[in-house]
Image: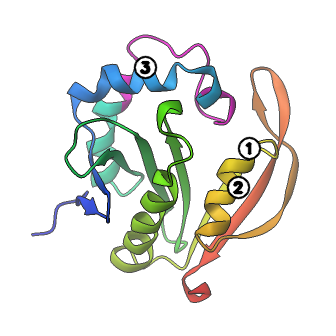
């Protein structure tokens, strides 16, 4: 039987299910204002205890097909580098992609490598037709990850989301299974 959330291995990385022991590292990495500034769903300051609550919610989310969240680590598992999540829209053949990398690991290609593995899972194992992601216009590094991963910019969603009490624009990117 295939696990609900399989480990995905790339040239340098291991994407594995989160463990409760990861909570302290998640909290530390997400507490950096630079990470929170680029992520719609990450509060700043990052509340104590939120990482463990989130980690404990991941198995049920995967089992129900709502969200598949992987811890991104080097192949030896020595450090938590970040996370990548694929959230399907049931019955629609599409999913939203989200990811973050801790500041000490920025600029090393980890996000692009992890996204490639998750795309293969989404289009292959889940049979998805479309995977989309949104980024703040100011988050050029995240937009570059998507572009290098074959996503196409579809447009600007003006005033689409609220972050820290202010309405923010988001840029929509998507990739179809047929985009190759």
Q: Residue 76, how many percent across, how many down?
A: 19, 47
The segment highlighted magenta reads: 36-54
Disc 2 from disc 1: Cα separation: 6 Å
Answer left or right for 33 relative to 68. Answer: right
Identify the element where label 1 is drawn. Answer: loop
Please identify the quadrant where the N terminus is shown: bottom left
Q: Which residue is the site of mark 3? A: 28
Answer left or right for 118 relative to 170. Answer: left
User: Disc 2, disc 3: CB below 8 Å?
Assistant: no
Judging depth in this view, the residue of 13 and 91 nearest the camera is: 13
Residue most extreme to the right: 158
Identify the element where label 2 is drawn. Answer: helix
Disc 3 from disc 1: Cα separation: 21 Å
Position above or below: 11 against 19:
below
Res 121 seen here: yes
Residue most extreme to the left: 1
Q: Which mark is residue 143?
A: 2
> How many other residues sit within 10 Å of disc 3, few (<14), some (14-19) or many (≥20)?
few
Q: Residue 139, how many percent across, how many down?
A: 74, 44
Residue most extreme to the front: 108
User: Disc 3, disc 1: CB below 8 Å?
Assistant: no
Q: Which residue is the site of mark 1? A: 139
Judging depth in this view, the residue of 49 and 89 nearest the camera is: 49
- Which numbered disc flags the more N-terminal residue, 3 or 1? 3
- Which numbered disc flags the more N-terminal residue, 2 or 3? 3
User: Disc 2, disc 1: CB below 8 Å?
Assistant: yes
Identify the element where label 3 is drawn. Answer: helix
């Amino acid at each position: 039987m295939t696990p609900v959330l399989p480990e995905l291995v790339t040239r340098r990385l291991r994407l594995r299910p989160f463990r409760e022991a990861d909570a302290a590292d998640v909290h530390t990495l997400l507490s950096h204002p630079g990470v929170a500034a680029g992520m719609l769903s990450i509060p700043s300051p990052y509340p104590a205890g939120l990482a463990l609550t989130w980690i404990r919610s991941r198995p049920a989310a995967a089992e129900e097909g709502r969200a598949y969240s992987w811890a991104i680590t080097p192949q030896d598992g020595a450090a938590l580098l970040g996370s990548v999540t694929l959230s399907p829209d049931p019955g629609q053949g599409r999913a939203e992609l989200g990811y973050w990398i801790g500041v000490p690991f920025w600029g090393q290609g980890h996000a692009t490598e992890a996204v490639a593995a998750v795309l293969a899972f989404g289009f292959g194992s889940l049979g998805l037709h479309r995977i989309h992601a949104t980024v703040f216009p100011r988050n050029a590094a995240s937009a570059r990850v998507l572009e290098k991963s074959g996503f196409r910019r579809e447009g600007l969603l003006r005033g689409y989301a609220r972050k820290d009490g202010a309405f923010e624009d988001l840029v929509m990117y998507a990739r179809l299974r047929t985009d190759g």
